[in-house]
Amino acid sequence: MFTFEKLYSMGHEQVVFFSDPSCNLKAIIAIHNTTLGPALGGTRMWNYATIDEAIEDALRLSRGMTYKNAISGLHLGGGKAVIIGDPAKDKSEALFRSYGRFVESLNGRYITAEDVNTTVDDMEYIFSETNNVTGVAEINGGSGNPSPWTARGVFRGMEASCLKVFGDRSLKGKVVALQGAGSVGTHLGRHLYESGAKVLFTDMNEANIARFKEAVPNAEFVALNDIYDVKADIYAPCALGATINDQTIDRLKVKIVCGAANNQLAENRHGDMLKEKNILYAPDYLINAGGVMNVSIEFEGWNAEKATKMVDKIYDTTLKIFKLSEEQNIPVYKATDLMAEQRIQSIKNIRGKYLGNLAHRFPGRKSN
Ligand code: NAD
């Protein structure tokens, strides 16, 4: 049940409910933390069974965005929105434009983007009512499909992991067990192929399997449930969250877990278990942040060179996290949270300093 105590304990600043019966809009925007800048996070559309489920999702996902944006070095806070409804039946121009007007009413405190069950076309409707939306089409100054950028970041995370475990960042000759041959998985497969790695992959979608085989000619298909048992150097979860769990963890024969999926650890204790088993876990919400890094530069004018430079930094940040994890003898997931929290706190601290210019507070008065 929704309580203010819950918001206090999770650290949220603001939760806003929007309704518009004319188009059956039921939306919740959760703004978790704006220390680093406006809260950015996507809008998810889902047929939640109860309002509590929708609130819970908005709270959990917006908090996750604070950490992701902070660890990625972005000048952005964390937020997320959910629209309650069936994406197959309830989408309309009016619904997204009405939602866009509500986003506009937050005056830039929240910036939205695509998420599960929302598309570039939906963002275009939102864009007709507010500028506070990213992930719009390239012809409108947007940054297009985020998946190639997400895959590039995951690949950089893999290189950092290889340096840590094998003493060489190259993937040449490494075997990667890749789960999920979707948008990110396929782009990642291409990077791996080009770098000389061998890919064992699984999926259940026939069209995606065929597309993957075309993109990665030497890839070998394995059955869905066998992906945890194969002999490989790296397990790359690129389909679902929580695949590191009590059922799978003892089956893994790899040295590294590094993939695009969100929330790969079913519970934090599985991160502790990976450390005990000497399996290096690449920080999931950093290495899959290439997509959000890419949309974050839409406001200053997107270009591929800027995006590349930003996403490639994932390599260095991943290494810094591994170092912190080793120095403090804590699992990688804890080191990642710690580094994100330290950045937020350090920026909060400098805000306490007086800037010596009152012009912004007294705009009517001329400064010397
Ligand atoms: P996608 O829907 O294009 O691909 C997912 C693929 O996984 C599909 O081919 C699907 O058939 C397959 N799949 C589903 N369940 C499976 C299972 N049990 N075993 C094997 N395969 C299974 O999604 P995507 O955009 O490629 O994203 C992949 C993952 O990365 C998701 O968890 C997503 O949340 C995360 N992610 C994506 C982005 C992005 O930019 N797209 C950014 C950050 C995180």
Image: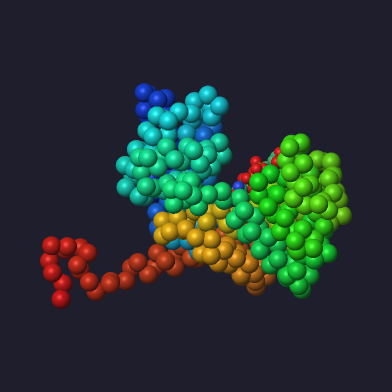
* Residue 169 seen in the figure: yes
Residue at 79% of width from left, 47% of height from top? 213
* Residue 339 seen in the figure: no
Residue 103 lies, with reference to residue 75, above or below; the image says: above
Residue 18: name its quadrant: top left
Residue at 36% of width from left, 43% of height from top? 130
Residue 327 lies, with reference to residue 176, above or below; the image says: below
Q: In the displayed image of the protein, which residue is found farthest to the front?
A: 139
Picture coordinates of residue 44, whole percent (x, y): 52, 38
Q: In the displayed image of the protein, which residue is found farthest to the right?
A: 231
Q: Quadrant of ligand 1?
A: top right
Q: In the displayed image of the protein, which residue is found farthest to the left?
A: 365
Residue at 35% of width from left, 40% of height from top? 129
Residue 285: name its quadrant: bottom right
Q: Nearer the viewer, residue 97 or 271?
A: 97
Residue 153 lies, with reference to residue 127, above or below; the image says: below
Picture coordinates of residue 102, whole percent (x, y): 35, 38
Picture coordinates of residue 353, whole percent (x, y): 32, 71
Q: Nearer the viewer, residue 6 or 105?
A: 105
Q: Nearer the viewer, residue 286 or 271?
A: 286
Residue at 31% of width from left, 42% of height from top? 105
- The C terminus - image quarter: bottom left
All told, the count of numbered labels is 0
Describe residue 267's horizontal placement relative to residue 165 as left or right. Answer: left
Picture coordinates of residue 203, whole percent (x, y): 76, 41
Residue 84 lies, with reference to residue 306, above or below; the image says: above
Q: In the displayed image of the protein, which residue is found farthest to the bottom?
A: 368
